[in-house]
Image (cartoon, rainbow, N blue to C red):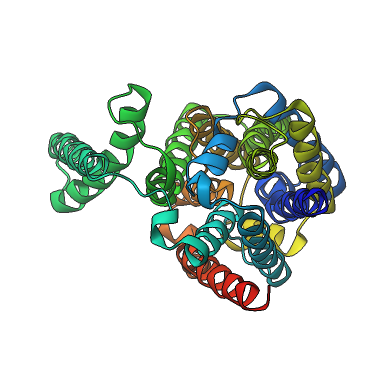
Amino acid sequence: MESILIIGIAIALLYNFLNGLHDAANSISTIIATRVLTPLQAVSLAAFFNLVGPLFLTTAIAKTIGKGIVAPEWLTLEVMILGVLVASFWIFTTAYIGIPISSTHAMIGGLIGTAVAYGGVDAVILPTLPMIGGVVVTGLAGALIGAIFLTAIARLKNEPDLAHFMKIGGLFGFIFAIPLSIVFQVLPISGILGIVLFIVISPCLGFAGAFIMASLVTRFFRNSDQHFMNKLFNKLQIVSAAFYSIGHGSNDAQHAMGIITAMLVTAGVLSDFNVPLWVILISSGAISLGTLTGGWKIVRTMAKRITHLRPYQGFCAEAGGGLVLLFVTIFGVPVSSTHAISGCIMGVGATQGSSAVQWSVVRQIVTAWIVTIPLTASCAFIVFQVFLRFF
């Protein structure tokens, strides 16, 4: 048991290392694209604040990973080890190719696949019907309010295409209704339902927040000298990159924390699910070390291929992404930092018009988002079946 536990902890740390390597692009792509820092300076900054984040914020996400996806009686060491191995392989492969995917969803897909292979569908903690119904009602109410609100504004401004504004208002009404219901504790969303919902919500929140922030900045500084703006936001972007890295570290580093703590509980080392300080430190250290290594192909995709960024846009993207990650971390929802920052980069690009965003690249990224959980779950299911046959 002890040797299997040590192997499991080592594999969880390898996952966090690859997570940091892959998601280094999230933390540093904008600051490199705007040439505020050199690549080495950027990864060093990101690595430090990735380490700082988990030490000062809640460990709610670790509990979701360790207790909210697979029922504890089916969460054996073998289930966790093989699930994390499949996730690690997917992260490494996509980093090598240069496709930004969600390390979070790779982990979740891997755990679901091995758990179903071992204990059937009942091994996965599925949302209740009342919870799903609450989400549908809340989302529809938000969509209706958003559609009415934006249509009324468009009518006051004599916009010709009211239907277009109605659709946009409905979409963002739905997107904002769910997080607001979580904040005011109207709708307790957790586990797999929260994860699936935020596949859509987190990039859209990032898009909307960064779009609004960039629009306000351009309006406020519309008469300012370009040299002054670049000088100001070059400095501010260092702050925003550090802020985003804190959010990234506090969210993503907790994946290995949750797995390692669940392994310790399963092995009988811990009596209940409380994340020890040493687990926080080694998990944060692994993701920071991975960030120092850097996934440069993904950095190029995020920094250059989606849209061309100026310093103020980089600041808005990082600040928006950091706010999204801090929000979901506090409420214990494991989300993709890749989704959040991608949405933010699209949002600031869209302030320059739709043509400023390379939508063909966006479609490739979104496709990778959609297939990650089903693909890793299927691979993990097959791997665990092979494991059972031979062992």
250 vs 359, nearest the viewer: 250
Can residue 33 be seen here?
Answer: no
Question: Given the current orientation, which residue lies at the most extreme right position?
Answer: 40
Residue 262: x and y in percent read: 63, 41
Q: Which residue occupies 78% across, 48% down?
A: 291
Against 197, is 331 above or below? above
Does any portion of residue 213 appear in the rendered image?
yes
Image point (51%, 70%), residue name: 375
Note whether 170 is above or below 390 in the view shown: above
Q: Is residue 292 left or right of residue 149?
A: right
Residue 38 point in image, percent of width and height: 84, 46
Q: How far across and how far down the image is residue 312, in percent?
A: 60, 37
Is residue 81 or residue 183 the one in the foreground?
81
Which part of the image, by quadrant, shows the C terminus? bottom right
The residue lying toward the viewer, choosing from 338 and 121, is: 121
Give the percent coordinates (x, y) of residue 55.
Answer: 72, 25
Which residue is depicted at the point 40% across and 61% down? Answer: 121
